[in-house]
Amino acid sequence: MMDLGHSSLSNAASTLGWILAQFVWLGLAGLILGRAKPGRAWAFGVTLLAIGVWSASLAQLKKPEETDVNRYFFEGVLVSEGVSPYRTPPARFETEASRLSPPALAALRSIPQAELNFPELGTPYPPIQEAAFGAIARGIRTLLGRYDRFAFLTGVVFAGLAFVVLGWRKAQVSWASVALFLCHPLLVREWGVRAHADSLMVGAMLLTLSAQKERSRIFFSWLALGLKYPGGWIAWFAESANPRSRLIRLAVVVGLGALAFGPFLLQAPSGTSGVAAFTSLWESNSGVHRWARMLFGLYPGDSGEFLLRLSMLALVGAFSFHLMSRRQLTAFEKAALGFQAWILLSPTPNPWYFTWVLAFLPACRPEVRKPLLLSLVALPLAQSWWAIDWVSTWSTGGWIGACMKGLQNLGVEPLWNIEHAWLGFWTWKAYRSGIRLSHVEQPQR
């Protein structure tokens, strides 16, 4: 979660900078992706650019701006010491002090509870992701003799990038395109500057779609589920002969996930279950949900809000089922459109969720890829709304803050609405462009 107390001017400048960076990237993409086969010089040049960009982004991890990544480190230390983050929320780690080594206690006590998101709750992260955090933390301690947050986060970033690059190469994406997409501002910002670990799940999803055998698709889908729960949905989009086989695969993946992960999730004490508690704290800050709440007069927490979320989920399911009938689209294109629809209709469309969609695009055809790339340009607009503290601006007498506060009280947030309208338009354009293409034969496996 971001700190909402930053100044308006600095965040406005940051927003403008990220939008301009995307246009610069789109210009570079036009030079490289527009070529039938980029030469080695292009690949070498973009690779050097990617190394420079990621080196600069990793330097900012010495003082992370996200509380989520502090929790990664905190729980990685706990897991490496044999303490369950499901049973022991960060706020209660001192109760396990007798089981923790001196280096672990020193590392955990060095992070103020205020720098962790919801420290009173058990972890919301799946077991395989927690195991990855524990392995990285243990590796750092073995190398350095202590737990180090910067080294840990660097390890998380590199592990995720390696997994994604492997997935792209398995999908037969050229090295020039791999290096180019590694330079995309959204990936750099969310996986580098903010060190979100979604890249681990994304790598598993890419391997699912590029797998040639059904057992491999089930395994990588299950792995994606264990790295982040929405990742298991990729089982639906991987190639199959018919929708029935997709339903069976999805059921197998979810069933295996319940058997493997259920014992961990049931460890949390009453009232501190990470997944359920974090989900209940979601803010319906999606433009679509705000419009629906205004239309039907709903309030957060009432039964109508639950029905709204359920209806949105049903719409995503119906659209995903419809995508399967469109043989003009490849598996990567169906996954990109399906996850984009899910994020658009989810109650809390966090910006790093869109990296899931972006990661599918190198393997998509230009007619589908271009509209989806354009859809992401407006994403920083909503982030400026999150980052600017309009309440403070209003209380100090600023007329812009007063206007924005008035609109917020009416349920109208212009930047969210602009972003969602923009995203929806270009997503529809991508879908229409894809189904106008010639028929794509899907292997009957």
Image (cartoon, rainbow, N blue to C red):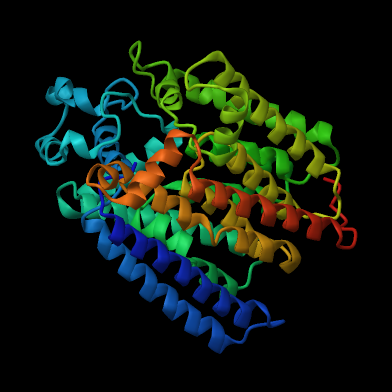
Please identify the quadrant where the N terminus is shown. top left
Would residue 37 appear left or right of 132 to someone viewing this image?
right
Please identify the quadrant where the C terminus is shown. top right
Q: Is residue 240 visible?
A: no
Q: Is residue 263 visible?
A: yes
Q: Quadrant of residue 436?
A: bottom right
Q: Residue at x 68, y 57 (%)?
A: 426
Q: Residue furthest right?
A: 439
Q: Quadrant of residue 118?
A: top left
Q: Residue at x 27, y 25 (%)?
A: 89
Would residue 246 appear left or right of 94 to someone viewing this image?
right
| Residue 187 on image: x %, y % | 47, 60
Would residue 18 appear left or right of 287 to someone viewing this image?
left
Would residue 16 appear left or right of 439 to someone viewing this image?
left
| Residue 148 on image: x %, y % | 19, 50
| Residue 286 on image: x %, y % | 53, 39
Q: Residue furthest top?
A: 270
Q: Residue at x 77, y 46 (%)?
A: 239
- Residue 243 higher or lower than 368, as above or below: above
- Residue 71 higher or lower than 160, as above or below: above
